[in-house]
Image: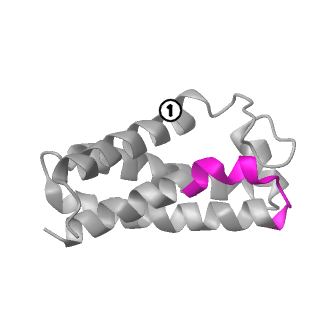
Amino acid sequence: MEIPKILVQICQVVVGCGLLNVWLLRFNKATSYRGGKASSMLEEFATYGLPAWSCYLVGFLKVTSAFALLAGFFYPVLILPAAAIVAALMAGALRMHLKVADPFKKSLPAISLLALCLLIIVGRLGT
């Protein structure tokens, strides 16, 4: 079954804009999806037992991948690597939520973005 190109493009926009929102606009803001009792991104990484530098590395990878997904409308070669990087990072995020025994709700953004990235990958490989 072929995935419609428009669906893949919608996923690119949702993932790209979603990541930019979280990492550029909500980095220091509390949300109900943050791991443990964290009220910022740095606190969330600390909750997982990760060093501060890993937060900045993950942030760099996610923001770069988000821009690559959006730039993929003009440079399609960027789409697959960007979606694969985000998918891998979302799998890691799920692992961290499990590590600290977060309720399922806190894993929903990671699950959603992972699913969207997998849809992008499958859709792009089918073209």
Going by the image, does 6 lie left or right of 66?
Answer: left
Going by the image, does 37 lie left or right of 85?
Answer: right
Measured from the top left, where is residue 38 in percent x and y?
82, 41
Instruction: Identify the residue at horizontal 85%, vertical 61% (top origin).
Output: 100
Would residue 31 be visible to someone looking at this image?
yes
In the rendered image, residue 106 lying in the magenta stretch gets the answer yes
Instruction: Identify the residue at horizontal 64%, vertical 60% (top origin).
Output: 93
Vertical placement of 111 versus 33: above or below? below
Q: Quadrant of residue 32?
A: top right
Vertical placement of 87 versus 113: above or below? below
Q: Nearer the viewer, residue 70 or 113?
A: 113
Classify the position of the N terminus by image quarter: bottom left
Vertical placement of 51 versus 17: above or below? below
Q: How is the image coloured?
A: one colour
Q: Nearer the viewer, residue 18 or 6?
A: 6
Going by the image, does 92 lie left or right of 4?
Answer: right
Under circle 1, the secondary element is helix
In the rendered image, residue 103 lying in the magenta stretch gets the answer yes
Considering the whole magenta stretch, tell me its main secondary structure: helix
Which amino acid, mark 1? Asn
Instruction: Identify the residue at horizontal 56%, vertical 36% (top origin).
Output: 22
Residue position marked by numbered label 1 in the rendering: 21
Instruction: Identify the residue at horizontal 40%, vertical 59% (top origin).
Output: 117
Vertical placement of 42 versus 83: above or below? above
Q: Nearer the viewer, residue 28 or 95?
A: 95
Q: Tell me where the magenta segment starts and ends, as one range.
A: 99-111
Measured from the top left, where is residue 72 in percent x and y?
20, 50
